[in-house]
Amino acid sequence: MNKRRGTNGWLVTTGIAGFTAVVMGAFGAHGLRNVLAPEILAVYHTGVQYHLWHTLGLGLITLLRQQAPQSRPLAWAAWLMLAGIFLFSGSLYLLAVSGIRWLGLITPLGGVAFLAAWACVAVHGWRQP
């Protein structure tokens, strides 16, 4: 089995995450600007910012996994980063457009996933010779 097959899938996932981050940003800037109150638009914008930054993080993890395809911390980091994007940014997008306030309870779970992903990257780095 090709050791890079798994990282190629993560590269595709990173590309999709980046694409959707730009789409969501454009939708917020052009489609929601005159629809949402400024404070709710700021919530949406926070989701876009975290989506973009953590997509870059996912890309970094993908590149690191090409060098160390057997690294369990990096495998966990990739999944946690993706979960964080869905939970953190996704809940903020849905909260902003739907007005359903309890979705804000999901957001911190995404934040914890982001923290855990970055911690896994640190663990991987710590274990390197």
Image (cartoon, grey):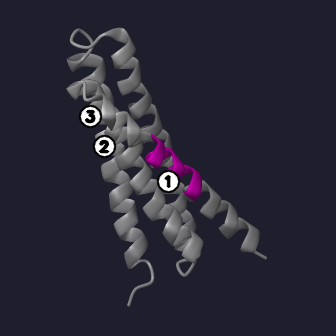
Question: For this rendering, which residue is in front, 113 or 6?
Answer: 113
Q: Secondary structure at mark 1?
A: helix
CB under 8 Å between discs 1 and 2: no
| Residue 24 appears in the rendering | no
Q: Nearer the viewer, mark 1 or mark 2?
A: 1
Question: For this rendering, which residue is in front, 73 or 29?
Answer: 73
Q: Is residue 29 left or right of residue 64?
A: left
- The three-letter amino acid code for the residue at tag 2 is Phe
Q: Nearer the viewer, mark 3 or mark 2?
A: 3
Q: Quarter of the image for the N terminus: give it.
A: bottom left
**Residue 62: where, in percent of width, then height?**
49, 63
Q: Which residue corresponds to the image point at 31% horizontal and 28% vertical from the top-left?
A: 101
Q: Secondary structure at mark 2?
A: helix
Q: Counting residues from the N terminus, which is met first, the one under dot 3 or under dot 2?
A: 2
Which SS type dominates the magenta stretch?
helix
Q: Secondary structure at mark 3?
A: helix
Q: Quarter of the image for the C terminus: give it.
A: bottom right
Q: Quadrant of residue 7?
A: bottom left
Q: Is residue 80 left or right of residue 100?
A: right
Q: Which residues are magenta?
A: 108-116
Question: For this rendering, which residue is in front, 3 or 55?
Answer: 55
Query: Mark 2 sits on what residue?
Result: 19
Indicate whether 2 appears above or below 43. Answer: below
Give the Cα separation between the discs numbered 1 and 2.
Answer: 21 Å
CB under 8 Å between discs 3 and 1: no
Give the Cα separation between the discs numbered 3 and 2.
Answer: 18 Å
Query: Mark 1 sits on what residue?
Result: 113
Q: Which residue corresponds to the image point at 37% horizontal and 78% vertical from the top-left?
A: 5
- The three-letter amino acid code for the residue at tag 3 is Leu
**Residue 21: where, in percent of width, then height?**
34, 38
Query: Mark 3 sits on what residue?
Result: 94
